[in-house]
Image (tube, rainbow, N blue to C red):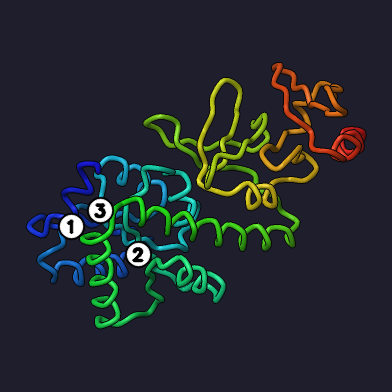
Amino acid sequence: MNQRTQVVNDPATRIRVLIVDDEPLARAGLRRLVARDRELEIIGECGDGLSALTAIQDLRPDLLLLDIQMPELNGFEVLRALGPDAPPCVVFITAYDRFALRAFEVAAVDYLVKPFDDDRFEQTLQRAKHALRSHNVAALEARLNALLARVGDAEAMNAATSAESLKRLVVRDQDRIIVVRTEEIDWIEAADYYSRLHVGARTHLLRESMTALESRLDPKRFFRTHRSAIVNLDRVAQILSGNHGEHLALLHDGTRLRLSRGRREALQQRLAL
């Protein structure tokens, strides 16, 4: 059990809250409601996703009140960029569609739909406090991962019907938050709930499933070699034959990626195009 889990489980210790919403009036309303609860301590507030990333890393809140629809970087992108550093408990504030609301319910993650009244907010706070006081961080993180996977799949389906492909991703690079242009990615590998981006000599962990990420990437540029890897076609140097009828994609930097059965011909066709 880490230090933050011990602190949260101590009833004498106040729960540290960070408020993130791009609307000043909304932040003021949340600040007023949180301030009424003596078990809570407001440690900061942010008006956009990029500043929220820095604040979460620096302040390490126990509870995050997070707006979803924000310009440039939405709430889901904030959590994906944070990866393992995401707060243990998140309450989403949203005017989102029905799919997202069902995803919240299935993942047992609480949410507030704008506009909400004081009683609804109080109910949400009580559930958040109970979760933090009685559950370990691993259980809360599993719920958040399940939510991000479900919502990521929905975003992927929406992107599949759109002519615009994903152009950039926001990720952590040690103590920095950086923007990675998708064209700079060499290849991507699966890592449990995450996707690991290989960009030159660096790797970045993104809190998004391979299926969701693949559907948002430009299909003219990226190809899924097998269930655990996606490659940037511009990085493929050769297709090699291995043992027992296996094939490999050799990248310009020497990386070898296994090709699933039947994917060799598909890759050759894509490279020809």
Residue lying farthest to the top in this orientation: 254
Taking the image as shown, residue 33 lies to the left or right of residue 251, namely left
Residue lying farthest to the front in this orientation: 244
Q: Tags 1 and 3 in contact by the CB under 8 Å rule? A: yes
Does residue 29 appear anywhere in the picture?
no
Q: Which residue is at the front of the view, 2 or 76? A: 2
**Label disc, if present, on residue 91 of the rendered structure:** 2
* Crowding near the residue tagged with mark 2, few <14, some 14–19, many ≥20 C-alpha atoms within 10 Å: many
**What type is the residue that disc 2 sits on?**
Val
| Residue 18: % across, % down | 26, 55
**Earlier sequence position, callout 2 versus callout 1:** 1
Name the residue at 69% across, 21% down. Answer: 255
**Earlier sequence position, callout 1 versus callout 3:** 1
Q: Secondary structure at mark 3?
A: loop
Q: How many marks?
A: 3
CA distance for labels 1 and 3: 6 Å
* Crowding near the residue tagged with mark 1, few <14, some 14–19, many ≥20 C-alpha atoms within 10 Å: many
Q: Tags 3 and 2 in contact by the CB under 8 Å rule? A: no
Q: Secondary structure at mark 1?
A: strand
**What type is the residue that disc 1 sits on?**
Ile
The quarter of the rendered structure image containing the C terminus is top right
Q: Tags 2 and 1 in contact by the CB under 8 Å rule? A: no
Name the residue at 83% across, 29% down. Answer: 246
**Which residue does the numbered mark 1 point to in the structure image?**
15
Q: Secondary structure at mark 2?
A: strand
Name the residue at 77% across, 39% down. Answer: 221
**Earlier sequence position, callout 3 versus callout 2:** 3
**Which residue does the numbered mark 3 point to in the structure image?**
62
CA distance for labels 3 and 2: 11 Å
Taking the image as shown, residue 251 lies to the left or right of residue 243, namely left
| Residue 74: % across, % down | 48, 56
| Residue 199: % across, % down | 60, 27
